[in-house]
Amino acid sequence: MTDALTRFFRNRVIPVVVIDDANQAVPLANVLLQGGITAIEITLRTPQALAAIEAIARHVPEMQLTAGTAMNRAHLQQVKDAGAELAVSPGISAELLEGARDLGLALLPGIATASELMLGLNAGLSHFKLFPASAINGIALAKAFSGPFPEARFCCTGGIGENDVADYLAVPNIPSVGVSWLASRPAIAAGRWEDVRAAILKASVPIR
């Protein structure tokens, strides 16, 4: 496992965020660090996403930067140039695997089936994003995968509510979960950092 993945998985709960204004990126990163969250996944869903990654890379180097929703080689190149250390994808493909290898960029590909998991394992990976977790009964699926694929570990993401976190993290091969409510899009857009602090306290799951 790469250093970027090691640091990512030290966090039991990963904030998966959508940033509409790059000016909010640095304050957000600082609030998360103050709350003990040392990794953030910034999704490539807005025109400001890459600028937000660049801002955090420049001003908050302690934050482990991850770019989400990377779906092709061009995305991988963009996020690496912006300063991300790790790319997360909703799926897995030969293009992503080859692109990440060529760029020297850590990759956490999304999987939802045994065939996809085998593709990643055969490419030398051991850690994956299990997505969309709530829709595919992620807890049961991770447990089922533990038999034939004991080396695989998962960050479950997609529809995981505040009351679901403990159940996911109780499964041995789910060391982390990704959630959107820890730093919600409305809270970030309005700069309501007290809401983010409250969500971190409510999650009350420290890093490893």
Image (cartoon, rainbow, N blue to C red):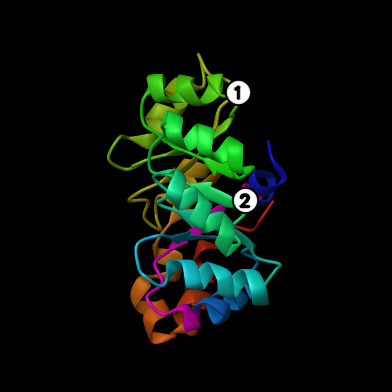
- Is residue 115 or residue 167 the one in the foreground? 115
- Going from the N terminus, do you reach mark 2 or mark 1 first? 2
Q: Crowding at label 2, few (<14), some or many (≥20) Cα neighbours within 10 Å?
A: many
Residue ID at (62%, 47%): 9
Q: CA distance from mark 2 to mark 1?
A: 18 Å
Residue ID at (61%, 45%): 105
As drawn, 89 above or below 136 = below
Residue to which mark 2 is pinned: 8
Give residue 39's position: percent from left, percent from top: 60, 59
| Residue furthest out toward the top | 148
- Is residue 51 or residue 132 the one in the foreground? 51
As drawn, 144 above or below 73 = above
- Is residue 180 or residue 1 the one in the foreground? 1
Pick the quarter of the image with the N terminus: top right
Residue ID at (37%, 75%): 20
| Amino acid type for the residue under numbered disc 2 | Phe
Q: Disc number at residue 163? A: none
Which type of secondary structure does the marked residue at label 1 adopt?
loop
Q: Can residue 170 be seen here?
A: no
Give residue 94's position: percent from left, percent from top: 44, 29
Q: Is residue 34 left or right of residue 79?
A: right
* Magenta highlight range: 9-24
Q: Is residue 133 left or right of residue 126?
A: left
Which type of secondary structure does the marked residue at label 2 adopt?
helix
- Is residue 201 or residue 76 the one in the foreground? 76
| Amino acid type for the residue under numbered disc 1 | Glu
Give residue 5's position: percent from left, percent from top: 64, 45
Query: Which image quarter: residue 181?
Result: bottom left
Residue to which mark 1 is pinned: 151
Give residue 10's position: percent from left, percent from top: 66, 50
Q: Is residue 182 magenta?
A: no
Residue ID at (64%, 42%): 104
